[in-house]
Each structure stands twice: as structure tokens, then as C-alpha cells.
Image (cartoon, rainbow, N blue to C red):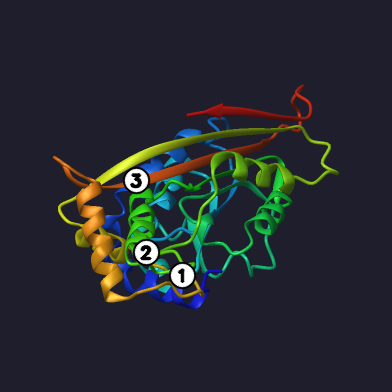
Amino acid sequence: MIDKRLLSKRFSEHAKTYDAYANVQKSMAKQLVDLLPQKNTNHKINILEIGCGTGYLTRLLVKTFPNAAITAVDLAPGMVEVAKGMTDKERVTFLCTDIEEMAHIENYDLIISNATFQWLNDLPATLEKLFTRLTAEGSLIFSTFGIDTFQELHRSYEQAKEKLKLSIDSSPGQMFYNLEELSRICEAAIPYSSAVPIEITKMEKFELEHFQTVREFFTSIKKIGAANSNKENYCQRPSLFRELINIYDKEYRNESGVKATYHGLFFKIEKHDHSEKSGLQARYYT
């Protein structure tokens, strides 16, 4: 379970350094823009963005939809303040709240979220709630991190525990879904009573970042506020940490430095109220 107070505190504290380190998150935001519906971009539509952070995707939405009313939500007050200072506030309404606790949600033509859903404690319930707030031809588009994110860190951690003979059941971060697991959750969130044809587009993409040292990699995580925010503690023995670094540096270094894998999952769920399509359809890309 994610400790939302700790999560909010960490992201707020690092809001001013976030953009300097969030290279993968920016790349994912651009890929979400490529998934946006191209029709009616000049029409007056209602958009909800979940996890706006410093407003990078928000500003892309303002540019893409010049006549849209945008509500941008984030859990961390520090992030919201930075986003407000960099965004056309006349076009955007910013809310500092937890989408899982947000009771009164309007109807939206587009609900979009970048690199945020991995921080939710009840993703299925949240998806179901959001889906019910889509308009007749609305779209829910989001990205999140997949199961192979930071695989080098998790493997090094397990190897270090084994080498030091530590029989502890812990992890240095939360666990993520794979593409098909998340696809099943999305499909289950669609109300059975929905008579509107649904199309799901899903894809995954891997990105690598390289760092001069393992500690530099840890610093990059800290500087965007994405350090471990689980309620459950994980083993932080200095000896384990040193062994983890040694293994990581030895096993996952190449000519570019030590590598860190980001596994991005992308979903686009569309209603087609006036379409001739019927039932649930899915398209898969890699």
C-alpha cells in the first residue's frame, strides 16, 4: 500500500527539481499526445488530467485543445504550485486532491493521466469510477509503469539478500502490472450495462537511462520524489545496501554507464456511441 501522505510530501519537496530529472516521464507524456483523438481538437471539450505534476502534459493539452476546459489534479501541493506558475491558469483549473478520494467528478470528453496510476492503492475501483464519468464518445488515455521497470534494481536487491543470507520478504519499491494483467483490469472496469461499443488500444515501450554511478541513479529517483513510499518497510541494512550497489554496478554497467530500465504501459479506452462497431475490441502494439 502507498502511504499517500508520504508520497505527497516527497513530491512536494522535489517539485522544483522534478523537470530536470523526469526525462522518461516527459517522453511518456509526448507518446500520450500521439494517442489523443485527432477529431474535434478545436471544439469545446471537457478534460480531466490526473497527476498533473509540474504541468508538462497540461501545457501540451492546452496547445493541442485550444478551446478545452481543463481540470488538472495532483496529490502534491508543491507540484500544483509549480504547475500553476508555468501554465495558462485562465485555461486550466488546478485542484490539489487525491483522485481516489475525489467524490464529485463531472463528465469529461477526455480523461488522461501520465505516469501516475502506479501510485494508486485501488486502481480497479478508480478506473471504474473514471469510466462512468466519460461522455458518450469519451476517451480514457493513460500511461503507467510496467513490471519490468527498474528490473536491474530489483534483481540486484534479490541477489544481495541471497548473498547475505537474509530471509526477508521485502522489495525496494512497489510492484507493477504487466500489459495483459492491466488489460484485464481495464476490461473488468467497463460496466457490463454499457451498451456503447468500446475499443481498447494498448501498447508497451521500454526506455533505458544510463548513469555514471548507481548512487547517481538513486539520486535521480529522489529528485523527482519517486522514492519508496510504501507503508510496508523494506530492509535498509547498510550491508545490504552496499552489496546491492556492488552487484548493480558489476552486472548492469556498459560503456554508457549503469543502466536503468523503464517499462511504459499505454492504454487508450474509447467509447464509440455512434459507431457501427459492436462489443469490446482491442488493438495491441509493442
Q: Position of residue 196 (x, y in %)?
A: 79, 35
Q: CA distance from mark 3 to mark 1?
A: 25 Å
Residue lying at 39% horizontally and 58% vertically, measured from the top left: 158
User: Which of marks 1 and 2 precedes in the sequence?
Assistant: 2
Residue type highlighted by circle 1: Ile
Residue lying at 74% horizontally and 25% vertically, measured from the top left: 275
Residue closer to the observer: 200 or 36 = 200
Residue lying at 71% horizontally and 53% vertically, measured from the top left: 128
Residue type highlighted by circle 3: Thr
Q: Is residue 269 above or below residue 175?
A: above
Q: Position of residue 181 (x, y in %)?
A: 61, 44
Residue 218: in sight, yes or no? no
**Which residue matches tag 1?**
168
**Which residue matches tag 2?**
161
Q: Is residue 272 above or below residue 118?
A: above
User: Which of marks 1 and 3 precedes in the sequence?
Assistant: 1
* Front disc: 3 or 2: 2
Disc 3 packing (10 Å; few <14; some 14–19; many ≥20): some
Secondary structure under the numbered disc 2 in the rendered image = helix
Residue lying at 49% horizontally and 42% vertically, measured from the top left: 265
Residue closer to the observer: 249 or 86 = 249
Residue type highlighted by circle 2: Lys
Which image quarter is the N terminus in? bottom right
